[in-house]
Amino acid sequence: MTSEGLEVVRRMYERRETGDMYVGEFVHPDIEFIRIGSEAPDFAGEWRGTEGLRQATAEYLNVWEDYRFEVERMVDLDDRVLVLETQTARGRRSGAVISQDVAAILTLRDGLIVRWEYYWDRADALEAAGVSE
């Protein structure tokens, strides 16, 4: 399972790099999508199912222009994969530019992502994953 899970996550992120941010084929229909630690009220929360994931993704991306992310590292954690990335974007209304180091912990079962935890504070993700940078 270990290398299979890492490969699934790698393929999903490759798809996202092409601009296809909704990656339904890689996720379980009842996926739990959780954004943790954001100080912006609309960015934190929990969504369930592929429609919830689609809604959360669309709402988040609607706030930004020139949204980009760069994966720095993926760490295989048996049934989970830790992804360290940097997001950059410009606020659609404010024009403010952001650059944020974030992380995700993706839990897999039977080759599909069943839980996607997105951490605004990378240190919190590393602690949750039991990994040191």
Image: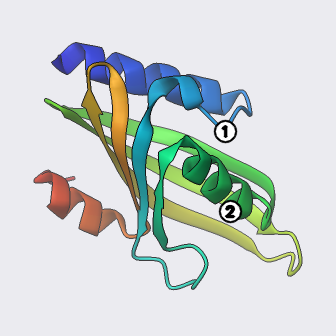
Quickly name the residue at label 2. 60
> Taking 84 as reference, is 17 left or right?
right
* 71 and 77: which is toward the camera: 77
Residue 92, given in percent of the width and then of the height, sits at 87, 70
Q: Could you tell which of marks 1 and 2 lies nearer the N-terminus?
A: 1
- Give me the C-alpha separation between circle 1 and circle 2: 11 Å
Q: Residue at x 40, y 76 (%)?
A: 37
* 92 and 62: which is toward the camera: 62
> Taking 122 as reference, is 22 left or right?
right
Q: In the rendered view, would you say 25 is above or below 50?
A: above
Badge 1: how crowded within 10 Å, few (<14), some, or many (20+)?
Answer: some
Residue 118, given in percent of the width and then of the height, sits at 42, 57
Figure quadrant of the N terminus: top left
Which amino acid type corresponds to the residue marked 1 in the rendered image?
A: Met
Q: Which residue is drawn at 22% across and 52% down?
A: 133
- In terms of image quadrants, where is residue 108? top left
Which amino acid type corresponds to the residue marked 2 in the rendered image?
A: Tyr
Residue 36, given in percent of the width and then of the height, sits at 39, 70
Q: Is mark 1 on a helix, strand or loop?
A: loop
Quickly name the residue at label 1. 21
Residue 2, given in percent of the width and then of the height, sits at 17, 20
> Taking 40 as reference, is 119 left or right?
left
Badge 2: how crowded within 10 Å, few (<14), some, or many (20+)?
Answer: few
Q: In the rendered view, would you say 114 is above or below 12?
A: below
